[in-house]
Amino acid sequence: MHPGSAVRQECLEKHGLSVTDAARVLGVDRQTLSNLLNARSGISPEMAIRLEKAFGTPAREWLMRQLDHELAEAMHKADSIDIQPLPSAPDEMRERS
């Protein structure tokens, strides 16, 4: 799930805010918030801080949700990423560590 859906449910709906009202609370323009809510943009570190200050959920939690979403999206494409693993390091290199 895109974290914008969680913002809509946990912040706007929970507090009975319209997009315009929530944008005003967050100190961003309506289009910026709309882009997040409609999965056209993600949660930036600055937006995470704004969400924490306004609604109490820690910024780190918002950023982890964003990271989880981005990783899930990338994993859907993982089979198309053609990478050959490096061979194991020689024993002498391991002994130096």
Image: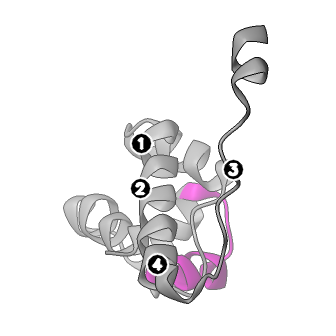
Q: Secondary structure at mark 1?
A: helix
Give the Cα separation between the discs numbered 1 and 3. Answer: 13 Å
Horizontal side of residue 77 vs 72, given as left or right: right
Q: Mark yes or no: residue 97 visible.
A: no
Residue neighbourhood size for the residue with mark 3, other residues' Cα within 10 Å, grouped as few (<14), some (14–19), many (≥20):
few
The structure residue drawn at horizontal position 49% and vertical position 60%, both measured from the top left corner, is: 66
Horizontal side of residue 63 vs 72, given as left or right: right
Residue closest to the eye, 3 or 92: 92
The amino acid type, in three-letter code, at marker 2 is Arg
Residue 39 in the image, given as x and y percentages of width and height: 49, 84
**Main secondary structure along the magenta-highlighted residues:** helix
The amino acid type, in three-letter code, at marker 1 is Glu
Quickly name the residue at label 2: 65
Say the numbered circle drawn on residue 61. 1
Q: Would you say the residues marked 1 and 3 are in contact, meaning their CB atoms lie under 8 Å apart?
A: no
Quickly name the residue at label 4: 73
Residue 37 in the image, given as x and y percentages of width and height: 45, 79
Say which of marks 4 and 2 sits in front: 4
The structure residue drawn at horizontal position 50% and vertical position 79%, both measured from the top left corner, is: 78
Residue neighbourhood size for the residue with mark 1, other residues' Cα within 10 Å, grouped as few (<14), some (14–19), many (≥20):
few
Residue neighbourhood size for the residue with mark 2, other residues' Cα within 10 Å, grouped as few (<14), some (14–19), many (≥20):
some
The amino acid type, in three-letter code, at marker 3 is Glu
Give the Cα separation between the discs numbered 1 and 2. Answer: 6 Å
Q: Would you say the residues marked 1 and 2 are in contact, meaning their CB atoms lie under 8 Å apart?
A: yes
Residue 10 vertical placement versus 61 (above, below) = below
